[in-house]
Image: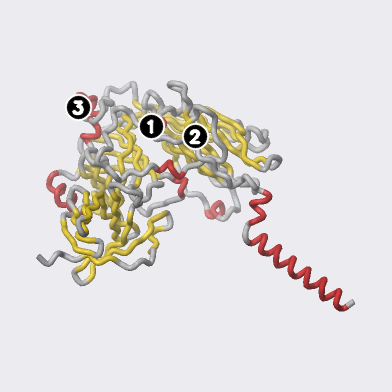
Amino acid sequence: MKKTFIYFSTVIAVLLILLIIFLATGLWKKIFYAQADENIKTKIVTPREANMYSAAGQSGQVSWEENISTKIPLEEGETVIAILNKESEENMPEEQFVVYSTSEAESPVFITFLGYDENTRGYRRLWNAPTTASKSETINIFSQDLIGDRNNCVIVTGMNGKNEHTMTVFRRSPGRPVVYPYKKIAELQIAGSIIIQETVRSLAYQQGLTKGQSFNIAAYGQDSASLNILDQIETIYAYNSANEQYEQINVSRIPGSQIEQRRLRELLSGVPGVFEKFINDLWYYVSPQGTIDAKQYIYFDPAKKEIIFFGDEAQQVFFWQTSTPSRYGLYIKSQNISISTLLRFVDIELESLDSIKLRVIEDVRLRITASTTWDGSYRRAGAANFKETLTQLRPTIDAIFDSSLGRIQFNSSGEYTITSVGNVKKGRYIFYKVNNTDLLELRPEEGDENRLVYKAETAAGVLLLSRVKVGINGVQDLLEPPITLTKPIN
């Protein structure tokens, strides 16, 4: 009897250990949610307009769409533009929203919802809905609690064929059929700009105790009754809980700057390159008090297809992907040259011949936040400060070093060569900062070698390069032996 009890206890103990391993390793997910984690690659492209500058000579671009995948493939003729993965509010595998275009000419872009089906243990397409946008290169999708009830809305912004800004908002509505759980609660389009007016919510809301105040949406368009093109009409929309829709609650006039109208029409004509040439300069941030902040500025370089942001002692370089004229300026889609999954949309409006207003939209799907806000007014730096500041922010040098890799020559054009025993390697490079860490990135011209990122440190007159990895978690040291760069003796 005692041996039987010991044997039975041993079997139970072993089974318990196996159960713990089974749960801890996540093997249960692969059995019960066999298809939940399966991502199927779908055709994804970045459309380019005919009026865009050539990307020749710019090796900094890596297609951010390469890492995007849908839970299930879309239909023939449907091309993925953007994807939002959202946590399910019913303790199910994550939901996926896909913005896509069709092969039909002048068709709006659509959004589709891919949800997990417990019966088939896989994802299936639950519904499709059109948005008000049609230009694929301007599309952005994100989720936000607009209403204040922690029921995050799905928001799609972009531009349509008339170069109007658009916003379409979907919200999960309690009691709606499972096959169509999201309802369209706002659909705006205007030849101007559309802004979500965020307000600070109470501490009780932050702690999950109460609901928060809903955010209004503001749309700014031209005042057709005024002779000044820059005079605008502000229309405010608020959420009506009775019919679950955003409704217009207020309209007011906002006077703009007085600018010579002929020059103004020329800048806002929408002719390719005109507004790009106008902003080709260094721009200082202007505080709400009207003072210039020389520690925060933006440099637009349409020739090199770069936008350089500088603030909080850190420099960020973005590849200028596409430009779309808007009623009051330009809408730019850009991509961080080092973190290729980080996008930044820049909405520029003309304030005067020496000032512009910026609204910068981060790719919030990555949950990346910056300590410096770029929204606001900027004033042209002017010839007096241009060369001095530009020298500080240019991410290139003109120098030659000896190293274990060979002789490295950095050219001010952004190109480098490494010569070692008759073997020559070429590519492009850039110096930049992340979290106050100086970094050097080498982008080989050819071959299968990926980008090489190094932490750059100066000690005892030499430059030390240590391999690192840069991602959304910051800079991670790869713990490889450092490379020492020294000035040639001769």
Residue at image location 41% in from the left, 51% down from the top:
369
Residue at image location 45% in from the left, 31% down from the top:
250
Q: Which residue is mark 3?
A: 263
Residue 380 image-quadrant placement: top left
Taking the view exactly as shown, the residue that stands out farthest to the right is 1
- For the rendered model, the colour scheme is secondary structure
The alpha-carbon separation of the residues under discs 2 and 1 comes to: 14 Å
Mark toward the start of the polypeptide (3 vs 2): 2
The alpha-carbon separation of the residues under discs 1 and 3 comes to: 31 Å
Which kind of residue does numbered mark 1 sit on?
Pro
**Do labels 1 and 3 touch, CB within 8 Å?**
no
Compared with residue 201, is residue 460 higher up or lower down, i.e. above or below? below
Q: Which residue is mark 2?
A: 99
Which kind of residue does numbered mark 2 sit on?
Val
Label 1: which secondary element: loop
Residue 60 in sight from this viewpoint: yes
Q: Position of residue 124 (x, y in %)?
A: 62, 36
Q: Which residue is mark 1?
A: 47
Q: Residues within 10 Å of mark 3 (few under 14, many from 20)?
A: few
Q: Position of residue 358 (x, y in %)?
A: 32, 40
Q: How many labels sit on residues?
A: 3
Compared with residue 167, is residue 387 higher up or lower down, i.e. above or below? below
Q: Residues within 10 Å of mark 2 (few under 14, many from 20)?
A: many
Mark toward the start of the polypeptide (2 vs 1): 1
